[in-house]
Image (tube, helix red, strand yellow):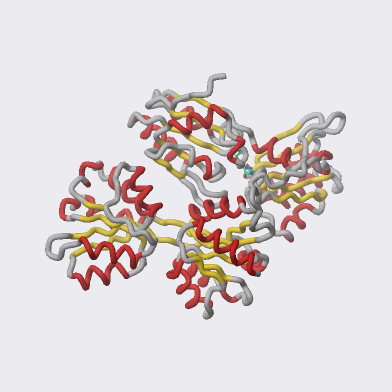
Amino acid sequence: MKHHHLAAPGTVYLIGAGPGAPELLTIKGASLLKSCDAVVYDHLASEELLELTPKHCRRIFAGKEAGHHSMPQEEINDCLIRLAGEGLGVVRLKGGDPFVFGRGSEEILALQRHNIPWEIIPGITSAVAVPELAGIPVTHRKMSRSFHVITGHTLKGLRDEQELAVYAKLEGTLVFLMGFHSLSVITQGLIQGGKRPSTPAAVIENGSLPQQRVLRATLETLAGEAERQGFHTPAIIIVGETAAFDLTSDKKTPFADTGALDGLTAGLIGTGHFIKKLEAALHREGARAETLLCMEVLSEEGKQFMGPFYRRLQEYTWLVLTSVNGVELFFQGLFEAGLDLRSLGHMKFAVIGAATGEALMARGIRADQMPKEYCCAHLAASLRKVLIPGKDRVLMARAQGASRDLNHMLDTAGISYDDVPLYTVKGRPELKMHQRAAGCDTLIFASPSGVEEFQKAGGFQLSHLHLTAIGPVTAAAVQKAAQRPADLVSSSYHIPGLIAALKEAKGRG
Ligand code: SAH
């Protein structure tokens, strides 16, 4: 068997990432990921797979969850064409299989129009694997002689009754993808079309992942139960006799190797990137994670603010970047302005912590200043030692409303600077945030801005929640918003430190 497939320059590889669990990627997909220069990925593809990519690899996020806007298809196509045109080996990573409701074929047509070489690497589709891992076979001898994979995305109104009536006549198993938001339309339509109300039916949320949930019911009760139990996307709907099967093995949480946090449910408030990482770490310890509020990065306005500064880079001696998002957006803007790394050659770089430093390194630049502790005050302190008043001029490109610690330090030290709001962070509470928060053993706040947004969404109105804050700055924000100190504060801003603190607290109580 040939194990090594190297991504060729200028080629786009459409790779199916499988249903979610990272180990369900093909061997060929893995070796291409290990050797690519850029990866354009969707939200359904596991974040852990990105860890396979080499350090220099550009990681570009192309899609958010259903219902929230994502990069339009045209833009994704253009992005692939541009990256391949730069001579990079490009991976387009898609959840499941690229040709199953993945718009993979559209991307290939666009690549063909631009004469860009491409290759497709199939993936395990969620349509089969998600029910399978939940113990539901899509076919079974004499019971279900076929299965039908249907998009529920457009099934919203009355005009779809006819379409559902056609599906209602099919004898095989019905598998609906992207149908969760139309669940009651689908089940009612099928019943009206003639399917028995007592037909077994199931919803599977986060299939193949440690946080997978399965709901078994009948066609008649499924939508009500899913609502009552707070099911959410990504989810698959199965209708047919085999939906009553439960062929699950005993080994239900393949990730829980230590289980030190078994039984703990944590509610997470932070950026999508951070939440995904923290979620994976919690799962490894056997804990459950619920996203309560996800911070969204808005950069349109910031692009306009930043525009003129790219033309004046020569005036600055230092560039300060304080987040992975900041690094990504800064470079995106730089390239869009028609510039490249050479226009930064004269500058020194300061970053806020290790993750930001790594993001910078991924773009070929080593940070000159990186405080050991991730926080603005430490960054200010370390910068203060090296900046020379009257000589240095600092450009800060970061989130709007970021900590003023840096500004105060620069003001007092008499160093001139510009502080450009490169992006805005906005909180997006999950559906039924309060209800979900009430079911958590602790809420974990990853940043002061997350605390603020949670407060705006009325989260702190719930009493007797157990609150965990990452680092002293976030802890101070919690104290202010909740009007009481956080129950647990991890001294470290890193995930391993937080996990250790949670374990210790669990051991105590
Ligand atoms: N190309 C993908 C499907 C893309 S459509 C594939 O072959 O699997 C996206 C839909 O797939 C979601 O709306 C959801 O219905 C389903 N889906 C994908 N991964 C899932 C998962 N892990 N658990 C439940 N549903 C999933």
Asked if 397 appears above or below 19 in the picture, the reply is: below
Q: Nearer the viewer, residue 164 or 42?
A: 42
Asked if 45 appears above or below 505 in the picture, the reply is: above
The residue positioned 59% from the left and 31% from the top of the image is 123
The residue positioned 76% from the left and 51% from the top of the image is 215
Please identify the residue farthest to the bottom as the structure is shown. 483
Q: Would you say 291 lies left or right of 226 here? A: left
Q: Quadrant of the N terminus?
A: top right
Q: Would you say 82 lies left or right of 185 here? A: left
Q: Would you say 338 lies left or right of 244 here? A: left
Q: Nearer the viewer, residue 312 or 300?
A: 312
The residue positioned 51% from the left and 56% from the top of the image is 496
Asked if 465 appears above or below 327 in the picture, the reply is: below
Q: Position of residue 341 (x, y in %)?
A: 25, 42
Q: Position of residue 270 (x, y in %)?
A: 50, 60
The residue positioned 49% from the left and 76% from the top of the image is 479
Please identify the residue farthest to the left as the structure is shown. 390
Residue 254's quadrant in the figure?
Answer: top right
Q: Nearer the viewer, residue 415 or 180?
A: 415
Q: Position of residue 359 (x, y in %)?
A: 37, 48
Q: Position of residue 70 (x, y in %)?
A: 49, 47
Q: Is residue 157 visible?
A: no
Q: Is residue 323 visible?
A: yes
